[in-house]
């Protein structure tokens, strides 16, 4: 196999390839962006007050729209303002969907990242850097996600964590199911030995030194506990959970949780499997 040194092309300075060409490639195959199996929904949408939104992509599983803005060369302040403005207009016009703003540029500078990171978590925003590379007579595009969408560690639509206590959950669910939470945390052993339960209104999380770090969380029900394990959805874990003898709920794509529905018997029979998943989650999302 022969090594060929790639030739990086500046799309901004290219006479052959321009923003419209890049936009067409994305709309033709949205999977290039690495955001999942998305559908192309709209292009050059005229916005209220002027301007055109480059591209709208759609995730039918999550009922989520991605408002995509493309800029060749370096990002600048007007680009982020325009992107956020278009995202805001779309989410107000179509509140039945979740919405996420996406910025695509050839060069996303560190200064720009510092600015948009201030918004992230409050405004769902993804920054993707694109490089065009020529190999002989062929050209290829490489997309790198340099800033991912950050979501709050909530399991509800509320954006404010409301504290509660153990008695609240014992009344809302049952004393038995809250004891199941204790049993799971104790069974995890060294993985969570430095953590304690943090009771919130919509879920029970975990904390260390008064700082929440919810790579796992719990929702007690009357007779069971839903254990949420924060992991990227991968085939390896999917296949593992296909063969278990307890109930699993659908993967939560919005919050990136595998959800296990567990009773006392399930916990006793599957603790090693649970520990393996939680240890992996801790390694990925440990603060």
Image: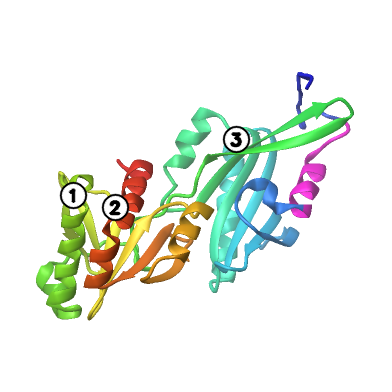
Residue 76, disc: 3
Q: Earlier in the sequence, mark 3 or mark 2?
A: 3
Identify which residue is drawn at 62% across, 47% down.
34
Cα separation between marks 1 and 2 = 9 Å
Q: Is residue 271 left or right of residue 71?
A: left
- Helix, strand or loop under label 1: helix
Residue bearing mark 2: 275
Disc 3 vs disc 2: which is toward the camera? Answer: 2
Asked whether residue 257 appears in the rendered view, the answer is yes
- Percent of width and height locating residue 213: 27, 49
On whether residue 27 falls in the magenta region, the answer is yes
- Percent of width and height locating residue 9: 77, 26
Neighbor class of circle 1 (other Cα within 10 Å; few <14, some 14-19, many 20+) is few
Identify which residue is drawn at 14% across, 79% down.
171
Contact between marks 3 and 1 (CB within 8 A): the answer is no
Query: Which segment is the magenta one?
Result: 15-28
- Helix, strand or loop under label 2: helix
């Amino acid at each position: 196999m022969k090594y060929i040194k790639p030739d990086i092309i500046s799309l901004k300075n290219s006479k052959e390839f321009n923003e419209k060409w890049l936009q067409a490639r994305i709309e033709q195959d949205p999977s290039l962006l690495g955001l999942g199996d998305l559908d192309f929904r709209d292009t050059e949408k005229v916005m209220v007050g002027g301007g055109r939104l480059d591209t709208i992509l759609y995730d039918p599983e999550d009922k989520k729209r991605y408002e995509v803005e493309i800029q060749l060369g370096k990002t600048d302040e007007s680009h982020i303002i325009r992107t956020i403005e278009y995202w805001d207009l779309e989410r107000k016009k179509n509140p039945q969907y979740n919405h996420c703003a996406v910025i695509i540029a050839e060069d996303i500078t560190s200064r720009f990242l510092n600015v948009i990171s201030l918004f992230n978590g409050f405004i769902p925003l993804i920054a993707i850097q694109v490089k065009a590379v020529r190999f002989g007579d062929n050209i290829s595009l490489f997309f790198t996600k340099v800033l991912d969408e950050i979501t709050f560690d909530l399991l509800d639509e509320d954006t404010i964590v409301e504290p509660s206590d153990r008695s609240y959950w014992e009344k809302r669910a049952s004393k038995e199911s809250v004891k199941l939470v204790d049993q799971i945390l104790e069974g995890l052993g060294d993985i969570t030995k430095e953590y304690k339960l943090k009771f919130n209104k919509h879920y029970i999380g975990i904390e260390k030194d008064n700082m929440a770090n919810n790579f796992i969380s719990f929702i007690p029900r009357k007779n069971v506990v839903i254990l949420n394990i924060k992991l990227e959805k991968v085939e390896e874990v999917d296949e593992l959970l296909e063969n278990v003898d307890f109930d699993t709920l659908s993967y939560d794509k919005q919050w990136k949780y595998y959800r296990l529905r567990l009773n006392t018997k399930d916990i006793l029979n599957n603790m090693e499997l649970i520990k393996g998943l939680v240890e992996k989650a801790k390694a990925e999302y440990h603060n």
